[in-house]
Image (spheres, rainbow, N blue to C red):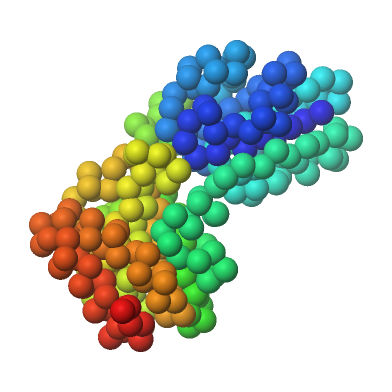
């Protein structure tokens, strides 16, 4: 049996009992380590599971899947992924490959950012398309995400923006020379993301992401218990907070849609207060700014 097992969002204890049972019975266990990250090191997982883990990078999962699937028709093999197995198309692809080889498969689900984003207080059924935001370079600034956000905005829907991570990436020079030398890991922060959104808004000029009129919720380490950090306010205010105010990676951002309910705004007040404190204007000012934009731009009044 080939298992694809979701690990959840935080640490080794987020594994489900069903997932842990599969790990205990497996002869080989791979840890997918590039579409997302857990908040603990591999050694913590190994100590908790009582099993050795093989780190599977992008090349292995996408180009050497035969190695992962080897003998999975005769023994149990597990691929562990952060969040839920279907949070990345890569995992769908390897399941299709397994089926074509006649290998029985089983998926063990877990929490992911796709549902844990509800910690923002924004209702899950008011979300539209999720978009990914990649690191810009001097010569490459893709803006297709803007059109997806605009479609959500036109429908009044919230947008979950997933921020880029770069793990085991090669520089252009090392890639060209065939040198297996990798750059240090990089994780996009909320200020980087907001800056890029505003940059594209300036170029496109369609008023989709007006910095002063667009409310957003910034989320760091969702599901990370005491490490979870959520701040809320206009994009322009989120940009004013230093990166360390959002906590360690991973970070996500939600653009608030115009169909937002007054209870969603009320729930977010504490996060707006935290933003006010983070940028030095005070908690009450943070709350009032959140309410004011909600009223003037979204037509929502909180009693």
* In the image, farthest residue toward the right: 102
* In the image, farthest residue toward the front: 303
Q: How many marks?
A: 0
Residue 25 pos. (x, y %): 75, 18
Residue 293 pos. (x, y %): 27, 78
- Taking the image as drawn, is residue 58 in sight? no
Residue 250 pos. (x, y %): 39, 43
In the rendered view of the protein, which quadrant contains the C terminus?
bottom left
Residue 239, image quadrant: bottom left
Front-lying residue, 266 or 258: 266
295 displayed left or right of 152: left
Residue 266, image quadrant: bottom left
In the rendered view of the protein, which quadrant contains the N terminus?
top right
- Residue lying at 85% horizontally and 34% vertically, measured from the top left: 104
- Residue lying at 59% horizontally and 32% vertically, measured from the top left: 15
167 displayed left or right of 274: right
245 displayed left or right of 248: left
216 displayed left or right of 83: left
Residue 191 pos. (x, y %): 26, 55
Front-lying residue, 143 or 53: 53
- Residue lying at 86% horizontally and 26% vertically, measured from the top left: 73
- Residue lying at 55% horizontally and 33% vertically, measured from the top left: 14
Give above or below for 102 relative to 20.
below
- Taking the image as drawn, is residue 219 in sight? yes
């Amino acid at each position: 049996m080939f298992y694809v097992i979701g690990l959840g969002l935080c640490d080794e204890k987020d594994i489900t009992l069903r997932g842990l049972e599969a790990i205990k019975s497996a002869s080989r266990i791979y840890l997918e380590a590039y579409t997302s990250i857990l908040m603990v090191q591999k050694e913590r997982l190994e100590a908790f599971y009582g099993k050795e883990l093989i780190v599977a990078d992008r090349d292995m999962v996408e180009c050497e899947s035969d190695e992962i699937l080897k003998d999975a028709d005769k023994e149990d093999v597990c691929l562990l992924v952060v969040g839920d197995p279907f949070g990345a198309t890569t995992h769908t692809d390897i399941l299709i490959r397994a089926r074509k080889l006649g290998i029985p498969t089983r998926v063990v689900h877990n929490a992911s950012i796709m549902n844990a984003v509800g910690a923002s207080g924004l209702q899950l059924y008011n979300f539209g398309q999720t978009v990914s935001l990649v690191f810009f370079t001097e010569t490459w600034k893709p803006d297709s995400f803007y059109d997806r956000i605009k479609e959500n905005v036109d429908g009044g829907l919230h947008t979950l923006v997933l921020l880029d991570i770069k793990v085991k990436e090669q520089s252009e020079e090392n890639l060209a020379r065939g040198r297996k030398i990798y750059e240090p890991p990089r994780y996009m922060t909320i200020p980087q993301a907001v800056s890029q959104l505003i940059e594209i808004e300036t170029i496109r000029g369609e008023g989709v992401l007006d910095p002063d009129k667009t409310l957003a919720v910034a989320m760091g380490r969702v599901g990370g218990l005491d490490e979870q950090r959520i701040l809320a306010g206009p994009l322009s205010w989120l940009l004013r907070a230093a990166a360390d105010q959002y906590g360690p990676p991973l970070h996500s951002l939600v653009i608030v849609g115009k169909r937002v309910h007054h209870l969603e705004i009320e729930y977010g007040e504490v996060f707006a207060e935290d933003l006010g404190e983070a940028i030095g204007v005070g908690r009450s000012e943070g709350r009032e700014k959140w309410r004011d934009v909600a009223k003037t731009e979204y037509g929502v009044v909180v009693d």
